[in-house]
């Protein structure tokens, strides 16, 4: 049972009863039977006699008594166990007692119930290596100097509810085999529980104003830290939580270190606030890992952590970076994160996973997943799954970001066979080194980098790029050209040097993404990646010159069969050129008129009908540009485009011009039709 603090007028017979003057006036020390004075105010003869009546294991009651160093030493000597050389107590009551000097209970044995409720320790309180076999109560006790509980063993319940520790509190290697209650405890300086062992531990609403050190501690049952406040570093490295661990609504104003911490039960950090860096690297979460509405002002590191059965992690909010590099998820999981950056380098998923993200730049390089994995941009703020209905997770710390969009920065080294991207910004994504990109699924509005817009000048030549989807690596490669136009993005690696890949590496990436679009029946968007593939082949200097020349011609004439306007312009120019050639040199000077063969009475005459050889025009060039010759030449040109002969009598130059026209112009017309078909095909 818990003893209530002593009132101003104590419930026990006290030393100051009936005394109106002298040092005993107002003393609340428990009267020592059969005397009226407390142990501190007994005459020396009576005190010696009383202490002589005590023996090891005796029950004592010194509530409200004021102990000096000398008086406490006398009491400890009276209770000394000859076999151990240390004091041994039975039931001991020290409620509201005051220890003016060092309270040295080191190695003492408390065999019964011990009550230090509302006690005042004005100097060091030393309980190192003490043993509490029964329950002990330190509720509302005040420790003004260092409290030493190193290597203490609490076999019964240990209650430090509302205790105040003004100096460092040392519980190094302490053992709590029953319930440990630090509810509302106030630690002004450091609270040291390094290598301590707990059963049930209750730290609800405790205040750690000088940091908390639980490194190497073991909690064999449930550990409760809800609504705790920790100012300074909270160290839980290598701590083991065999039961559930509840840090709900906790506040960590300094760094929080959970390095190599093992959570065997459920771990709850719901609505907790971390204003410093938080480390969960190499931690193990065997049960659920609840981080709903958890806020991280700085970085949070889950590097190399293991999530065995976590079905849902988040939604959590982080103003800076969430690191999952090297982490492993062994079961199906939904990860909800709103953060500036999410690092998933070499993260492993052994089952299906869904990443719902907001405001985030994602590095997914070398991630490993054996089952379908979806990265989706959440358009609306995350709702509370277990909070008030209709409430949302606040994202105030991300108010200065450019928007809630999600940008994947790298997929290098990823096997994309099971990857689904939904509504993701891929303008800066690095794809080189990924495999099975032809099986990736792009859902929703996934955006890619665009080419520089507007007209640019290179060596006094105007340069304009037709808009298309491009890869960030192409931007990086083109930005390194000596005469690169503005608008191509540069890629600067961690050493500060420009980094880019070659066209030979980019061509297969474009090819794979083209196939991915085609397999999803998205032919129009696949065309941009075909264009990119052909561009990389054209600029690959390891390919034969003849092939690159052919590709250059293909690009110049029709943009690889994808630029209808370019092909039509070339067709129009070819037709104009053919028309002018016909008018100037292809049509003969005079048109030939056929002659018939007939008879004249009395004699026979012969009229030639074979056409004469065409006569090249000899008049001035401008005279040949007549409407009549234009009409004849236009007929030849139009017929040439559709592979028909105009039956027009032509000069030698005109004949060859028509042959060339009938060969080239239908090809240009076909390229234009192909480009139009490619843009409207379903």
Image: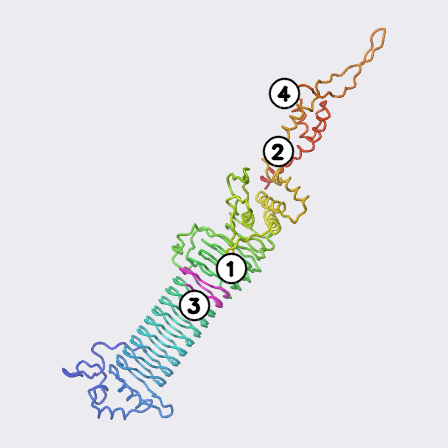
Q: Judge from the rendering whether residue 275 lies leftward or rightward of residue 562; answer left or right.
A: left
Residue at the spot 82% in from the left edge and 8% down from the top edge: 600
| Disc 2/disc 4 C-alpha distance (Å) | 25 Å
Q: Residues within 10 Å of mark 2 (few under 14, many from 20)?
A: some
Q: Are marks 2 and 1 in contact (CB under 8 Å)?
A: no
| Disc 3/disc 4 C-alpha distance (Å) | 91 Å
**Residue at disc 3, secondary structure:** strand
Q: Are marks 2 and 4 in contact (CB under 8 Å)?
A: no
Q: Are marks 3 and 4 in contact (CB under 8 Å)?
A: no
| Disc 4/disc 1 C-alpha distance (Å) | 73 Å
* 182 and 222: which is toward the camera: 182
**Is 617 above or below relative to 510?**
above
**Is 555 above or below relative to 276?**
above
Residue annotated with mark 3 = 257
| Disc 3/disc 2 C-alpha distance (Å) | 68 Å
Q: Residue furthest top?
A: 602
Q: Position of residue 526 (x, y in %)?
A: 59, 45
What numbered label is drawn on residue 344? 1
**Residue at disc 4, secondary structure:** helix
Q: Does the magenta stretch mainly form a helix, a strand or a loop?
A: loop
Q: Position of residue 270 (x, y in %)?
A: 41, 63
* Quadrant assignment, res 244: bottom left
Q: Earlier in the sequence, mark 2 or mark 1?
A: 1
Where, quadrant-wise, is the N terminus in this rendering? bottom left
**Residue at disc 2, secondary structure:** helix
What numbered label is drawn on residue 578? none
**Residue at disc 1, secondary structure:** loop
| Disc 2/disc 1 C-alpha distance (Å) | 50 Å
């Amino acid at each position: 049972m818990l003893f209530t603090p002593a009132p101003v007028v104590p419930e026990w017979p006290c030393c100051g009863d009936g005394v109106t003057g002298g040092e005993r006036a107002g003393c609340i020390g428990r009267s020592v039977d059969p005397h009226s004075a407390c142990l501190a105010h007994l005459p020396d003869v009576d005190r010696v006699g009383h202490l002589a009546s005590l023996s090891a294991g005796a029950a004592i009651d010194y509530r409200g008594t004021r102990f000096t160093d000398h008086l406490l030493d006398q009491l400890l000597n009276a209770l000394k166990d000859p076999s151990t050389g240390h004091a041994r107590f039975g039931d001991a009551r020290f409620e509201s007692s005051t220890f003016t000097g060092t309270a040295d209970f080191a190695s003492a044995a408390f065999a019964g119930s011990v009550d230090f409720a509302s006690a005042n320790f004005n100097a060091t309180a030393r309980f190192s290596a003490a043993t509490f076999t029964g329950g002990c109560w330190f509720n509302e006790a005040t420790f003004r100097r260092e409290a030493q509980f190193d290597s203490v063993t609490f076999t019964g319940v240990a209650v430090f509810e509302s205790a105040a520790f003004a100096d460092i509190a040392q519980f190094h290697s302490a053992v709590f085999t029953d319930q440990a209650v630090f509810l509302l405890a106030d630690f002004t300086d450091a609270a040291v529980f390094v290598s301590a062992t707990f059963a049930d531990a209750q730290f609800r609403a405790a205040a750690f104003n000088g940091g908390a050190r639980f490194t190497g501690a073991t909690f064999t049952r449930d550990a409760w830290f809800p609504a705790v406040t920790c100012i300074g570093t909270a160290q839980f490295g290598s701590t083991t939580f065999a039961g559930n661990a509840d840090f709900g609504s906790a506040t960590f104003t300094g760094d929080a270190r959970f390095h190599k911490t093992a959570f065997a039960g459920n771990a709850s950090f719901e609505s907790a606030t971390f204003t410093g860096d938080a480390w969960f690297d190499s931690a193990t979460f065997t049960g659920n890992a609840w981080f709903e509405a958890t806020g991280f002002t700085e970085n949070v590191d889950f590097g190399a952590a293991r999530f065995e059965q976590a079905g849902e992690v988040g939604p959590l909010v982080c103003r800076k970076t969430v690191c999952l590099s090297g982490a492993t998820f062994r079961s199906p999981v939904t990860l909800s994160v709103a953060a500036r950056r999410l690092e998933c380098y070499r993260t492993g998923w052994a089952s299906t996973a869904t990443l719902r993200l907001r405001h985030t730049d994602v590095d997914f390089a070398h991630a490993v997943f054996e089952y379908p994995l979806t990265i989706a941009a959440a358009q609306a703020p995350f709702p509370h799954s277990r909070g008030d209905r209709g409430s949302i997770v606040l994202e105030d710390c991300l108010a200065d970001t450019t928007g809630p969009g999600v940008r994947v920065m790298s997929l290098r080294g990823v096997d994309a066979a099971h990857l689904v991207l939904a509504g993701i910004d891929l303008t800066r994504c690095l794809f080189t080194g990924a495999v099975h990109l032809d099986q990736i699924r792009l859902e929703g509005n996934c955006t890619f980098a665009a080419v520089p817009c507007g007209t640019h000048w290179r060596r006094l030549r105007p340069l304009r790029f037709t808009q298309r989807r491009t890869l960030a690596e192409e931007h990086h490669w083109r930005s390194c050209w000596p005469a690169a136009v503005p608008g191509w993005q540069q890629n600067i690696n961690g050493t500060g040097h420009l980094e880019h890949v070659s066209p030979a590496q980019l061509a297969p990436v474009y090819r794979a993404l083209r196939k991915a679009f085609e397999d999803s029946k998205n032919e129009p968007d696949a065309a941009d990646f075909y264009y990119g593939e052909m561009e990389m082949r054209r600029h690959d200097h390891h390919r034969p010159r003849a092939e690159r020349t052919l590709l250059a011609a293909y690009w110049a004439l029709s943009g690889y069969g994808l630029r209808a306007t370019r092909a039509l312009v070339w067709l129009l120019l070819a037709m104009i050129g053919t028309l002018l050639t016909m008018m100037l040199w292809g049509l003969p000077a005079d048109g030939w008129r056929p002659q018939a063969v007939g008879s004249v009475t009395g004699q026979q005459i012969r009229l030639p009908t074979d056409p004469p050889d065409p006569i090249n025009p000899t008049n001035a060039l401008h005279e040949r540009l007549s409407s009549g010759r234009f009409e004849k030449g236009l007929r030849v040109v139009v017929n040439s485009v559709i592979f028909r002969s105009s039956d027009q009598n032509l000069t030698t130059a005109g004949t060859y011009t028509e042959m060339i026209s009938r060969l080239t112009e239908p090809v240009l017309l076909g390229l234009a039709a192909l480009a139009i078909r490619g843009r409207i095909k379903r």
